Image: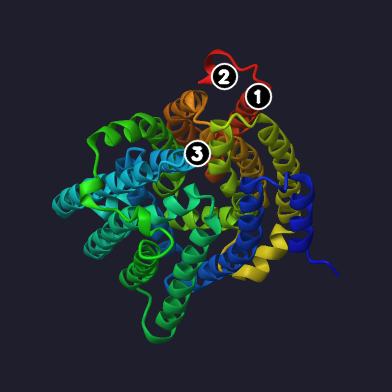
Amino acid sequence: MISMIDKLFLYFNNKLNRSSERSTNAIKNIIASFGIKGISIVVQLLLVPMTIHYINPTQYGIWLTLSSIIGWFGFFDIGFGNGLRNRFAEAKATGDYNKAKSYVSTTYICISGIFTIVWILFFCVNFFINWSKILNAPEQMAKELSIVALIVISFFCLQMVLKLINTVLIADQKPAKSDFYNMLGQIFALIIIFILTKTTQGSLLYLALALGLCPILVMLISTFWFYNSDYKQYKPQVFFFDKNIVIDIFSLGSNFFLLQIAGIIIYQSNNIIIAQLLNPENVTVYNVSYRLFSVATMVATIIFSPFWSAFTDSYKKNDYLWMTNTYTILFNLTLWICFLVLVLFCFSSIIYKAWIGNLLHIPISLSLIVSISVLFNILSTLHYNLLNGMSKIRLQMYLVIGGMILNIPLSITLGKMFGIKGIILPNLLYNMIAYLLCRKQVQLLLKKEAKGIWNK
């Protein structure tokens, strides 16, 4: 019997132009990523109950909220990562390999400098922050949380530099290789936490070290490996730094920067609001529900990832026929992924029971809102990827700025009225509006009928 992966391969192989190198790369990466991401999904699902058992639902909620807050420091990337992704792909498409190396070198130097400053500033300020109050945690945890926060920000800053190798791989239309090293980091973290459950008492400090150190070591090894083998010609070097490229990347990256800021505020503020309005345990309830439906998001990411840079390449070469055919195929596949979301919702109660047992109770009404929000997020993400590849992001900027301004006050207001469900309802509304508008923009661009805001 032909497996689902073989069927997917045959589908893409028959529908896409097989003579196109970008189509071949996309197919290979999608197939490889399904195996890699499949393992990642299993690992992440195993991590949730194991981590909750190791500490407890309340401490796990505290950990998730702290991680969300530290994630806000991604602001300081100021769009360099996504700017590199597009510019590197464009330089390779035109055969300008020296310029591609300059983009890589300049980005590494800028990001390293930025996050060194971020770490120093955080180190100084951290002494004056009352993390117990911010996280709505017991006061006796204040000292421990201060140490954990410093550990998390330290690993986070290192990760912002080291993960640039993943950006280069994705820009080169090889996301499967990036996924493979991410998977290794997750597997090592799972092993370490399993050992901790057998040898130590529950500790946020040990948890932070395990979840932070493992991916850092893997990214460090992959960085060394690729820049001394496949990507030796792009190995970052100080004398390839170009201040003009800083301006070039920033001019494009600044737009992505605004998208990043707004996206973090829209999606990462939920944990903080839930912890403050309700309690940390409800953060765990929300995240367990979200983690279930994010399985479908991961499937979508596997399929979408290769096409950002592929659309950059095809748009640069005015290959509208390839883009139109590819979009039609991707949209049809996305509808099947949305069907997967509905299936997960129908069996969610059974899955929760088998997955986390009696550790938590997840209301069916919460699962319904999360599932619909994820469904529209998947639909909008497809269009985000294609628009980002074509560098047509002005409409997205207006959408996320509006969402950023309205999300927190709406979440707080609705949260006071309806609890946890009200807090995440604005995400659902935002994803729905974003999908409808971005789909229209993609269609107009592919028909060459986009004007005004639709063409920016």
- Dot 3 falls on a residue whose secondary structure is helix
Compared with 423, 140 (above or below) is below
x and y percentages locating residue 257 in the rendered image: 38, 35
Q: Is residue 152 left or right of residue 294?
A: left
| Circles 1 and 2 in contact, beta carbons < 8 Å | yes
x%, y% of residue 106? 28, 44
Between disc 2 and disc 3, whose residue precedes? 3
Q: Position of residue 114 (x, y in %)?
A: 23, 45
Q: Which residue is mark 1?
A: 440
Instruction: Please state which of the two labelled residues, at mark 2 or mark 3, is closer to the viewer.
Output: 2
Residue located 28% across and 54% down the image: 157
Closer to us: 227 or 159: 227
Of badges 1 and 3, nearer the viewer stands 1
* Viewer-closest of 116 and 206: 116
Q: Mark on residue 415?
A: 3
Instruction: Please provide percent x and percent y for residue 46.
Output: 56, 71
Q: Nearer the viewer, residue 126 or 96?
A: 96
The crowding category of the residue bearing disc 1, from other C-alpha atoms within 10 Å (few below 14, some 14 to 19, many at least 20), is few
Tell me the distance, in whole angstroms, between the alpha carbons under discs 2 and 3: 34 Å
Side of 428 where 105 appears, left or right: left
State the SS at label 1. helix
Left or right relative to 286: residue 185: left
Q: CA distance from mark 1 to mark 3?
A: 32 Å
Under circle 2, the secondary element is: helix
